[in-house]
């Protein structure tokens, strides 16, 4: 009898195909938010340290908004409900994807259906690489602490407004680290699913250039207005 907690192979493959591109989109969004925060941090703060203007004050509000946005994106990427069978969760998230890629029948089916027979071995290798990286994430105390802080922030500040205790906020370093982990895992998953693989490193470079250009112009404009004051 089919275990109702285990999706049939056809459904499992369909879910992998649905999850991977949505994850890639969320990762690209997270990389853009990370680049914005990184470019807006120390260089801008240092440049505007002695400038008392509404624009300088607004910088902090902008940073906070993008910190929340990055937290939302990462919360989606690493989302999973505790106490509910992972196979019954309709989430385009890494924990759900890891469940499917960890199944031997899914691994075999993904390798067999490759558009190019020569890619079957590459697909199998990428699945193994994904699972090794996923295990490292699960076994890393620092990464698990970052995920716990992210979930706490999501539950107490974003999804709900709970007043019984203050959540642990993820640090910038934790958010940036989880973003890198998510990009690495999703890149492996794209190859495992024989999908078009995204050059997340190129995406990250482009987002950094755009963000630095934006914040450079912002800083120059604020300083010019401040210097022009009588």
Image (cartoon, rainbow, N blue to C red):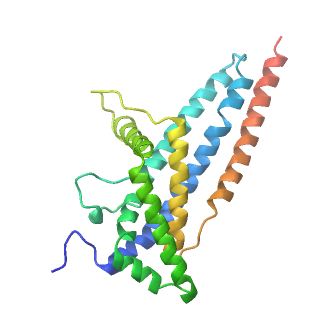
Looking at the image, residue 135 lies above or below residue 39: below
Looking at the image, residue 156 lies above or below residue 204: above
Which quarter of the rendered picture does the C terminus lie within? top right
| Residue 218 in picture, x, y percent from top left | 74, 33
Q: In which quarter of the image is residue 167?
A: top left
Which quarter of the rendered picture does the N terminus lie within? bottom left
Looking at the image, residue 30 lies above or below residue 19: above
Q: Is residue 78 visible?
A: no
All told, the count of numbered labels is 0
Residue lying furthest top in this view?
A: 230
Q: Please tell me which residue is depicted at 82% across the width and 24% down the height of the picture.
A: 224
Side (left or right) of 46 relative to 58: right
| Residue 67 in picture, x, y percent from top left | 53, 37
Q: Please tell me which residue is depicted at 57% across the width and 29% down the height of the picture.
A: 61
Residue lying furthest left in this view?
A: 1
Side (left or right) of 50 relative to 58: right
| Residue 219 in picture, x, y percent from top left | 75, 30
Q: Please tell me which residue is depicted at 35% across the width and 76% down the height of the picture.
A: 104
Q: Which of 160 and 182 is in front in this view?
A: 182
Q: Please tell me which residue is depicted at 65% across the width and 57% down the height of the picture.
A: 201
Q: Is residue 166 visible?
A: yes
Q: Quadrant of residue 117?
A: bottom right
| Residue 153 in picture, x, y percent from top left | 39, 37
């Amino acid at each position: 009898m089919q275990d109702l907690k285990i999706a049939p192979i056809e459904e499992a493959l369909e879910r992998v195909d649905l999850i991977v591109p949505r994850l890639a989109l969320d990762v690209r969004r997270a990389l853009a938010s990370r680049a914005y925060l990184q470019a807006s941090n120390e260089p801008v703060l240092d440049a505007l340290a002695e400038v008392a203007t509404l624009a300088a004050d607004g910088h902090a509000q902008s940073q906070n908004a993008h910190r929340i946005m990055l937290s939302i994106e990462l919360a989606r990427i690493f989302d999973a409900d505790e106490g509910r069978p992972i196979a019954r969760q309709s989430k385009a998230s890494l924990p759900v994807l890891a469940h499917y890629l960890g199944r031997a029948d899914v691994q075999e089916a993904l390798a067999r259906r490759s558009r190019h027979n020569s890619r079957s071995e590459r697909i199998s290798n990428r699945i193994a690489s994904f699972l090794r990286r996923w295990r490292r994430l699960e076994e890393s105390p620092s990464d698990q602490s970052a995920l716990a802080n992210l979930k706490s922030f999501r539950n107490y500040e974003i999804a709900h407004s709970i007043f019984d205790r203050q959540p642990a906020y993820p640090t910038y370093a934790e958010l940036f680290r989880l973003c890198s982990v998510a990009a690495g895992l999703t890149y492996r998953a794209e190859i495992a699913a024989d999908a078009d693989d995204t050059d997340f490193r190129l995406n990250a470079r482009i987002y950094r250039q755009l963000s630095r250009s934006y914040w450079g112009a912002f800083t120059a404009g604020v300083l010019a207005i401040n210097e022009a004051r009588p």
